[in-house]
Amino acid sequence: MLGLMQEWPLVCHKIIDFAARQHPHREVVSRSIEGPITRTTYAGIHANSKKIAQLLTREGYKPGDRIATLAWNTGRHLEAWFGIMGMGGVYHTLNPRLFPEQIAWIMNHATDRAIFTDLTFMPLVEKLAPAVESLRKVIVMTDAAHMPETALTNVVAYEEWLKEADGDFEWADVGEDAACGMCYTSGTTGDPKGVLYSHRSNVLHAMMACMPDAMGIGAKDVILPVVPMFHANAWGLGQSSPMIGAKMVMPGGKMDGQSIYELLDTEKVTFTAAVPTVWLMLLQYLELTGNKLPYLNKVVIGGAACPRAITEKFEKDYGVEVIHAWGMTEMSPLGSLCTMKPEYADRTGDALLDIKQKQGPAPFGVEMKITDDDDNELPWDGKTFGRLKVRGPAVASSYYGGDGADHFDSHGWFDTGDVAHIDEFGYMQITDRSKDVIKSGGEWISSIDLENLAVGHPDVAEAAVIGLPHDKWGERPLLVIVAKEGCSPSRDGVLGFMDGKVAKWWMPDDVAFVDEIPHTATGKIKKTALREQFAHYRFPG
Amino acid sequence: MLGLMQEWPLVCHKIIDFAARQHPHREVVSRSIEGPITRTTYAGIHANSKKIAQLLTREGYKPGDRIATLAWNTGRHLEAWFGIMGMGGVYHTLNPRLFPEQIAWIMNHATDRAIFTDLTFMPLVEKLAPAVESLRKVIVMTDAAHMPETALTNVVAYEEWLKEADGDFEWADVGEDAACGMCYTSGTTGDPKGVLYSHRSNVLHAMMACMPDAMGIGAKDVILPVVPMFHANAWGLGQSSPMIGAKMVMPGGKMDGQSIYELLDTEKVTFTAAVPTVWLMLLQYLELTGNKLPYLNKVVIGGAACPRAITEKFEKDYGVEVIHAWGMTEMSPLGSLCTMKPEYADRTGDALLDIKQKQGPAPFGVEMKITDDDDNELPWDGKTFGRLKVRGPAVASSYYGGDGADHFDSHGWFDTGDVAHIDEFGYMQITDRSKDVIKSGGEWISSIDLENLAVGHPDVAEAAVIGLPHDKWGERPLLVIVAKEGCSPSRDGVLGFMDGKVAKWWMPDDVAFVDEIPHTATGKIKKTALREQFAHYRFPG
């Protein structure tokens, strides 16, 4: 027997309809690419997204068409998203930090038919366009006065283009399971893989994100998504902010400490989110200038493990609550947020920081388990670590085109590729990537734990640990170190520093000193390259 | 093109699975029907609900079967809900405050096949059982020691029954659109009508309810649902509390001031919800005893318009935030919650109380409009009032058996039967029931506004305004008054008191004094009876 409740599909245009109806005057402030701070409202975003949907439809784009965006976080980018989704299209965010060849590969794989871009990226788009046969139109998000000269054909200035529409358009009648967004993961190995979000997954993810023990955001918040819209949907903030009617502040292309501080201060931002690197820059700027953060309540930090020092500075020096989060492009992206359950609610000081090193519990809508290599579930004891697998309405079921099918099992679990332990209260902590974990004598050693320990040595600038073949144990850890400028730490000095702080059998068998450790475009250590570099290395007998 | 996200149906057993996994030790405390305070946890609720689902399935109950509950709020009632839903059944809450004949009528209309009940209601169930042919089993939520003698056959003591199961049961594989719950509305006219909730509507409603600008509840809250589970699902708290892992405190059958205060105090309740009458009793008790409410942060008040004096006492004398809410059984039930948007966030004192008299804005997931009798939308100006219509994923699409089809239109809007205005910031305020609004010369007069004004007169205990036929104007208002004991207000005295406080043409044409105003079982003024009583009345010429 079916319930007798309304069919009210979870489609993304209902979010912007809601914002325009219930919060029409709420501002969306942007640091524009042209320079000045610009202001619109949810009513304005709604009106322009209607125009975009109308124009795309008029020009022959169809539901399901992929429309790329290669752009910074601005109000225009946001209305482009809602316009594309509102005509039934699929916004496809491109990461400008990838090599042009990679971007072109991704665009071809996705068969992008048009692109919204910023002035910043015109030189890049001029390179990409000839390489992407499916591409029919380039919409430069600026006005006529700022349009650069270009040899490209089929280019329009956004503001002029919008003048061709009156916005009298009914949102496309797509179901909630229709695709609405797309983002490719930039793995450290293999070709990028496309994640195809649905309206339903985006709406449910936004609802999950707003909950008090997740991001805990409401209409009185002023939200600055520093995390780019091209980086896993700006962690959903492009959907969750209008869903609750919060004012948004968009940083455009400037993520340096001073620029971010200016927005935090002048716009009285209460909530922000980004990767650790951004916060390092901000904290350095604050220390230099002596400025404070009187309005900011919460900062979500994810994308990489948040160093304890950053959490400590925010909480102790600036009175800002840090929410350490974990997620993946494949998860829309939120997987866990380290807010306090009653079991930990009374902690303060270092005891609290200990917990905040964890990536935290999963909200309702994310199921988690850790398993061994044979898919046996492992206990939640805060020590035993295993492959982290997840399930949920905002988790990918497969990659676009059927790539990477081995990441998904028949019971719907997605293998995150991360290795983690989970404590008795549900707090998850990433200990490694599964391909980087070191398997010694059938047991696992966390490369990240060893790295974190090694960088605690005063002379060590950066550390990476990789597993290398070993006759007896299968694999053993090698510690690779970049010394701080002017320092020359010794092998025995570093190992002596680490001794006693981890299990004896975890201790690296050797230390290698290098000038540089290779990184990916998104700043992660490129362990594949490192393993190649040390392919012929043999442990001291 | 469909998105490539996981099929993860929004089914209610995922809520209790989540609570048992992420918050296994969180308590559910009950004032038991037997007397003592009892304690279980979400792990315990989960385990027992598995047993219930297993037993019901073993005994031949099928997905879609309606299983009644006639019970107070307790942990047992909650696990009965999850057990019934988990085997694919439909929990059907019965309101013990109705007449036995009405309850039997409802049970027969729903074809209830079993019933979970409390000791309190055994005499009632003994009356009902012979009148409900479909009823096969009575489960009395107590243990063997407390089982009363009864002539009924097929009766079991809950705790003994549970011993027959080991809980090794896979939740029924029902889709999210399957029915899972049922509640009949007790309208002031006509037969009761059945609302049939789906798993999806319950899950989405719970998510909406938890959001910061709705109830704003999280794992650190201690939640006391005084509003009964048989009264519109305890406003969803039976689903939303486990969804966020909040401790629950269940009041059992005792809702008097002292009993509620004891629970608020000893269990350190932070969040509670009920109709105004309950809070009047509590506030009287607090005044009498001088007790305070140091732990309570928020109280949600709905079910009837919340008198300003209650809001004022809670906020000023006890530091408790009042959330004035509105909803309907047909809406699962939440429709609006009067929390502050930035536009009103700076208000304090009387200016804040003015806003809190409104029922507030709709959250994401509830669409609202007001219309005239011809379905033309009316402006949101805080003055113009019209028929309040709603749409959303947790709003009924029809009544069970197709009753009351005229409440639903072809565009999915449900006519709430309420009349309201909405201000420019989306704050809705109920001004009347549409059948009680007085239509004078083509314009509407709010009976509730006039009643609220009249009870402000020092000698008036209760007031009701009804529209009666009028040759010239179609209808004109008659004010019906019950005087306070020992007082004898005059017609001219009361009208003189009201004069100048409403538009001239709103002023009642006459005043009638009565000893008693008729009420429904749920305490609302029975205007139909009043109109009958005054059917032969003629306005002074």
Image (cartoon, coloured by chain):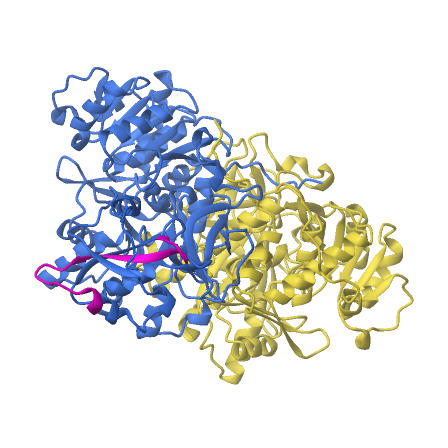
Chain colours: A yellow, B blue
Q: Which residues are magenta?
A: B469-493
Rendered location of residue A136, percent (x, y): 86, 54
Q: Nearer the viewer, residue A38 or B201?
A: B201
Q: Is residue B482 above or below residue A173?
A: below
**Residue A41 visible at all:** yes
Left or right: A235, with B321 as reference point: right
Q: Position of residue A310 (x, y in %)?
A: 49, 68
Q: Position of residue B508 (x, y in %)?
A: 31, 62
Asked if residue B167 shows in the view, the reply is no
> Residue A207 location in percent, x, y?
50, 51
* B420 to the left or right of A182: left
Q: Quadrant of residue A486?
A: bottom right
Foreground residue, A253 or B113?
B113
Residue at position x 52%, y 32% from top?
A: A375
- Residue extending farthest to the front is B541
Q: Please tell me which residue lies in front, B281 or A119.
A: B281
- Magenta-drawn stretch contains B486: yes
Toward the left, the furthest residue is B486
Is residue B495 shown left or right of residue A312? left
Residue A35 position by quadrant: bottom right
**Is residue B314 covered in magenta?**
no
Q: Quadrant of residue B86?
A: top left
Specify whether A146 is left or right of B339: right
Give the total of numbered labels: 0
Nearest the camera: A328 or B110? B110
